[in-house]
Amino acid sequence: MKIMQISVFLENRKGRLYDVCSLLGTNDVNIRALTIAETESFGVLRIVVDKSDFAIQLLRDNHFVANFTDVVAVEVPDRPGGLASILKVLAENDVNIEYMYGFVEKFTDKALLVMRFEDTDFAQQILAKHNIRVVAEKDIEGL
Amino acid sequence: MDVPFWNNEVETASRSQLEQLQLQRLRQVIGWALRTPFYKKRLGQAGIHSPDDIRSLQDLQRIPYTTKDDLRLSFPRGLLAVDMKEVVRIHSSSGTTGIPTVIYFTREDLDCWTDLLARSIVGTGATADDIFQNMMTYGLFTGGLGLHYGAERVGMTVIPIGGGNTKRQIQTMRDFQTTVVHITPSYLLHIHSRLGEDGICRDDLALRKAFIGAEPHSENTRRKLQDLLHIDAYNSYGLSELNGPGVAFECVCKKDMHVWEDAYIAEIIKPETGEVLPEGQEGELVLTNLVRRAMPILRYRTRDLAFLYPPGCDCGRTHRRLSRILGRTDDMLIINGVNVFPSQIEEKIMKIPEVATNYQIHVDKKGALDRLTVKVEIYPKLFLGEVATLEALRQKIVEELRSSIIISPAVELHEPGSLPVFEGKAKRVVDDRPKE
């Protein structure tokens, strides 16, 4: 079960992140998870929101460069070694993670991490095989 | 005042002797030029078919101007006047649209050029006792090798270190007790700002003179350099089309640069009309090379704005002096001594499909050095959300530009529509360097 992350290109300009967040906020789009990848001269904002189709259209209509990226929201036991136990499974099965980041808040007793894999389908198979739960898009909309 | 000369007879020849020599050499160079397809046609159209058609220096004005475009269109051999076997050196400069210009030298041509540089060096009071650190770029650029051979001819101890690597430059200045440097003014300012690092101070150096050139600078910059470093700084002028440095150089008086009129005929013209202007009036400098057999160039429009003084200088030289370069007639940028045309940048950028059509060239100062930033807008459809792809694109643009303009620009990626849009002629270049 993939979910849609929205990647937004951000040029290095004061207030540009604010512009995105304020646009989403005034249109009642809630950001559930967020991270920024930065380089010296530009950044890419990665967000998971509750209404992804609406949000990406909104961003594009407002001249932001935005695109969908497939990611997986993985439930991680919220205890010491919780993440390590999942990474162990992935490592043993040669699943490459490109990047990951956490959801803003918890919805169950588990922590929720957004993971971007080199090969999303393969990663999902491995996760399923090891009974590691992932969250569906519709669950995020309801969160 | 002690005035040193390299070739006293030529440097102090009377004006009539100089003009006699100029006429004789002009006729000779016309003969050489007529061997090239380019000048055979160009001079023929002006009714000049042999050196005999030039009877006085006034006849110079019958010769049509030669432009940078002419050189480009004649690339690579259209202006070569000798058999390639006689050519012993090639220099080249980057072209405005990717086609370079090339300059050929026979052994005698190099000898003449070297002698002009020896003359220029000695005119500043430098001698065979000096340790000379040549901090200009070597290679196809004429700045490095030109002064190198001139300094060797004078008998100076030459350190051919080339440009860049400030730390090593300063260490070398200390280790060998360098007394004279050849450098761009902006790089010398930068060197000064780095003194004190690694425990090397001004007092550890023996520096006493700097030949500064390859980029226009003001009298204020010269004074600043002299005051900061307690040295004498001498302005130098040249361009690769006319051999390179050694076209004009300041003497010990430091009151603008003597044009070596036995080797060059200098004229100032009104750029719009081509009308020749009298001494003292500012206009475009036009130069004729009188002593290069491999590649004669007649009445070359330098696109540099300057004026000529009437003859006379406290040093006793009769060769007229040229003012500082006051500007350009085109949009050429000089970035840390390197000539860059915005069209070169545009040509490269437009070849990259991921880049949209709007871009901006930004120049400013970071410390003493010029900084070139090229801002491009990305093409939205090609953004797939990955940082690595974008960073690779940015690197690709840097590499492409570096291969064309030699220097390495900073490249910024921008959102579509974020750079200023122009109706009609776009103003793509923003030069924020402080004007003096």
Image (cartoon, rainbow, N blue to C red):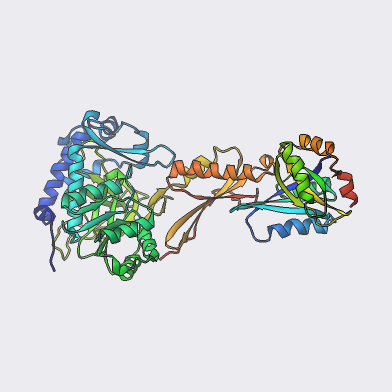
Query: In the drawing, does residue A140 fall left or right of residue B83?
Result: right
Tell how many labels. Answer: 0
* Identity of the residue drawn at 37% across and 37% down: B72
A2 or B362: nearer the viewer: A2
Query: In the drawing, does residue B308 fall left or right of residue A31?
Result: left
Query: In the drawing, does residue A74 fall left or right of residue A37?
Result: right
* Identity of the residue drawn at 16% across and 38% down: B28
Q: Quadrant of the N terminus of chain B?
A: bottom left
Instruction: Give above or below for B335 relative to A125.
Output: below
Instruction: Give above or below for B106 relative to B281.
Output: above
Quarter of the figure with residue B289: top left
Residue B16's x, y, as percent? 11, 53
User: Is residue B323 shown to the viewer in this render?
Assistant: no
Residue B399's x, y, as percent? 50, 42
B245 or B151: nearer the viewer: B151
Quarter of the figure with residue A40: bottom right
Instruction: Give above or below for B61 relative to B170.
Output: above
B278 or A121: nearer the viewer: A121
Q: Quadrant of the C terminus of chain B?
A: bottom left
* Identity of the residue drawn at 22% across and 28% down: B85
Most distant residue in the right direction: A142
Instruction: Give above or below for B305 relative to B98.
Output: below
Query: In the drawing, does residue B182 fall left or right of residue B1?
Result: right
User: Is residue A17 shown to the viewer in this render?
Assistant: yes
Residue B359's x, y, as percent? 57, 48
Residue B325's x, y, as percent? 33, 57
